[in-house]
């Protein structure tokens, strides 16, 4: 089993939009084969918000398959194409993978 985390530090004005996005991601993970659990943690300070997606997977391959699903790849393509028209609200993204030890 592995635990995946991805932390997004975002501009505060993007809070509602990002909250909706992470909600869809958690629901998608929970329905995906190999996902054991998924949740999103949230905190904010004066200038930024932080969303951390935490998910447990049967294997790293299961998580990679979730990342490669067509709708996820399309979201990234659209974000990249609209980069100049819509500046990103993401300040920093940190992804980590952990293996559960005995």
Image (cartoon, grey):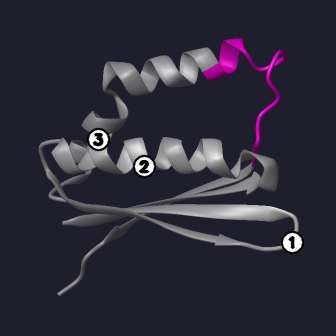
Q: Position of residue 96 (x, y in %)?
A: 49, 62
Q: Is residue 83 above or below residue 6?
A: above
User: Element under label 2?
Assistant: helix
In-front residue for pair 14/79: 14
Q: Which residue is mark 1?
A: 46
**Which part of the image, by quadrant, shows the N terminus?**
bottom left
- Residue at image position (29%, 47%) is 27
Residue farthest to the top?
A: 81
Residue 81 left/right relative to 78: right
Magenta stretch, residue numbers: 79-90
Disc 3 to disc 2: CB gap under 8 Å: no
- At label 2, counting other C-alpha atoms closer than 10 Å, the crowd grade (few under 14, some 14-19, many 20 or more) is few
Q: Which residue is mark 2?
A: 23
User: Element under label 1?
Assistant: loop
- Residue at image position (87%, 64%) is 47
Visible residue check, residue 40: yes
Who comes first in sequence, dot 2 or dot 1? 2
Q: Which mark is residue 28?
A: 3
Visible residue check, residue 55: no
């Amino acid at each position: 089993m592995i635990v995946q985390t991805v932390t997004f530090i975002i501009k505060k004005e993007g809070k509602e939009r990002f909250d909706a996005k992470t909600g869809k991601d958690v629901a998608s993970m929970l329905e995906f084969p190999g996902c054991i659990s998924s949740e999103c943690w949230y905190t904010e300070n004066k200038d930024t918000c932080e969303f951390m997606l935490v998910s447990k997977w049967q294997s790293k391959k299961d998580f990679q398959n979730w990342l490669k699903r067509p709708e996820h790849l399309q979201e990234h393509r659209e974000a990249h194409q609209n980069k100049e028209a819509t500046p990103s609200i993401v300040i920093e993204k940190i992804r980590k993978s952990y293996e559960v030890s005995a």
